[in-house]
Amino acid sequence: MIVRKIGENIISPLGFSVAENFAAVMDGRSALQHYDHLWGLPFPCFVSLLPDDILDKAFTQEVDQACLPKKPCTRFEKITLLSATKALQSTSLDPSSPRVMFILSSTKGNVSLLADAHPDIERVTPVHTAQLLARYFGNPNMPIVVSNACISGLCAQIEAYRCLQSGQFDAAVVVGADVLSPFIVSGFQSLKALSDEQCHPFSSVRKGLNLGEAAATVVYAVGDDNAEGWQMLAGAMANDANHISGPSRTGEGSYRALMSVLQSAALTVEDLACLNVHGTSTLYNDEMEAVAIHRAGLAGVPVNALKGYYGHTLGAAGILETLLTMHAVEQGVVPATRGYEENGVTMTLSLSSSSVKISKTAFVKLLSGFGGCNAAAAFTNDACRR
Amino acid sequence: MELTEELKTKMIEVLNLEEMTPADIADEAPLFGEEGLGLDSIDVLELIVLLERNYGIKITDPKAGKEIFASVRTMADYVAANRTK
Amino acid sequence: MKYKVLHTVKLCPSHLEVDGNRIAEAGGETSFLTDLYRRLGLDYPKFFKMDILSKVGFLASEFLLEQEGGERFVPRDDRAVLLFNRYSSMHADQTFQETIAHPEDFYPKPSVFVYTLPNIVTGEIAIRNKYHGESNFILLPEYSEQAMDQAIERAFLAPGTSSLLTGWLEALSEKEFEASCSLITVH
């Protein structure tokens, strides 16, 4: 069975469509900025934030306010609804069909509401937003939320793929979103995982990650053999079984997920245009990914990471980075790894601080996260073989 | 209370070393690795918070922490020399 | 979907059931969860560092795997861990929020923050048992056999997965928790 992408969107500080975002990436733009005391926090940080006025304007224009509950939406609810709405606009899919499944990918949803004097606990739960989303589109099915730390965006796509493969549904709307808050920023700060400067994936000067806000949506549907466009070929997850917050030094889970996907998708090193990796710019993540890629025999494949443009967008990352890589491969290019300087991992990868021309049509997306989880997925587009 | 004993009591609390008492922790025993208390990277981060919150000591580089947190003795020496409260 | 249930466990604040038999009752002054940990006779001090969701999930998995018997702690990738709940990591979230709520005493706790993700418990189980298979946490708006069955069917589509440690795992506080888990296989 063919699982084909039929709709897409990215909402980020760099644009409100995938095309706008891709153009920004090719221009080398980033929304990451330094803040001395963001929200009064007692430490500096370097993050990418979506301005409220721009979000509100698009939200009121695009999302039918009459179909929403009376209580004003939170920022998290707004970007989720906006991204799904814009993705579905470009398709002929009827989202109210019982054959369509809604899947949300988020790590922390409305967690910022916990700072309220009397928090609405129900609304804090990401399932509340997933239900808001499904109801807004009149969908009768119980939506699910995939919450697997930083790999959620790929896990959600893997769930979608299997929803279609198993015949449970004919289409799946996969929305990934997270917004930043003192909760998330101070949490990552407490783990000493943040850099207060531009992040430098895989570089010797790297000292931590940047966080960013975004929502991204991909719509998958059962496709026929003759149609053109992007297909999801396979997806896999694997656990390091090593530590809840530190990745395996041998890249165990990442390597296993990668090998499983290559085998399921029947891809070899010769087929791959690129690997779009996690590349958070923490000391351990980047080293681990380099080890996993070497073990898999893929050291020669062009590698890139997009965190230097967006920061780590958490629950959105897996979808946002997949969509941008699809556009890049379509254009025959691997975008520059923004922030990449002198190699700083023990096993060298084919990274570049400028964009690289390519002609192949399949790629693999990798992510890893807390809880020792790792995911990989493979995609191809035969139509862009020219 | 002696600083080493005070540190042991606080460590047991913040690191949730439920089944230990201060008497179980020798001053010179390594805090990391198999022979010692077997603390991990999150424990180091908690010890950094402990020093900041109780003694006003800021450690920004967790790597520097490895030497400071070698044993209760090294920790106590560092606190005695650097405390601001 | 047809699958075989090997063992089941139900853990709630009042008692523990394994394969339908009540094997422990809460009582006494100490925490029921700590009592159960001691009953297992383990030397696994990491247990005390876990948040409540992880403690409940860890204990449920230990009682399940004790029933299974056979050789444990040998690396394997044919078993996936797939858990569900509604409230995600709410208890850890509230605990962490408390550490950042007061600007004059602002000390975000790293050991609490790491547990503000529901899938950490799946990692704890994978680490303990050396499971390199899939680990996944799905949030559902309510306890739904149908939704869980569908997710289980999807999990078995993974080429290497032949058994699952799966079930509902909710923990809102020391006094409010529920684990209803099972060990299942396709064969």
Image (cartoon, coloured by chain):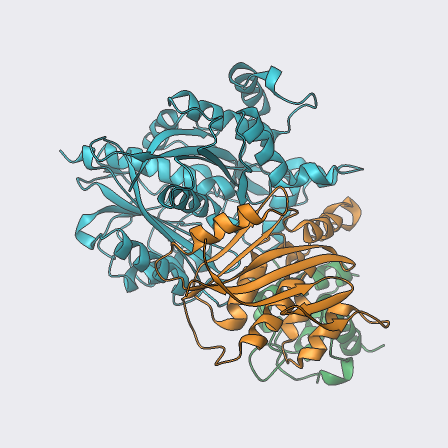
Chain B, colour shown? green
* Side of C13 relative to A331 (left or right): right
Q: Is residue A284 above or below residue C36?
A: above
Q: Is residue A216 above or below residue A341?
A: above
- Residue C116: x and y in percent read 63, 52
Comparing A222 with B8, the one in front is A222
* Side of A130 relative to A260 (left or right): right
Q: Quadrant of the N terminus of chain A?
A: top left
Query: How many numbered tags mark residues here?
Result: 0
The chain drawn in cyan is A
- Residue A298: x and y in percent read 25, 57
Residue A206 seen in the current view: no
Q: Residue at x 44, y 59 (%)?
A: C134
Q: Residue at x 13, y 33 (%)?
A: A386
Q: Is residue C143 above or below residue B5?
A: above
Q: Residue at x 79, y 78 (%)?
A: B5
The chain drawn in orange is C
Q: Residue at x 64, y 29 (%)?
A: A74
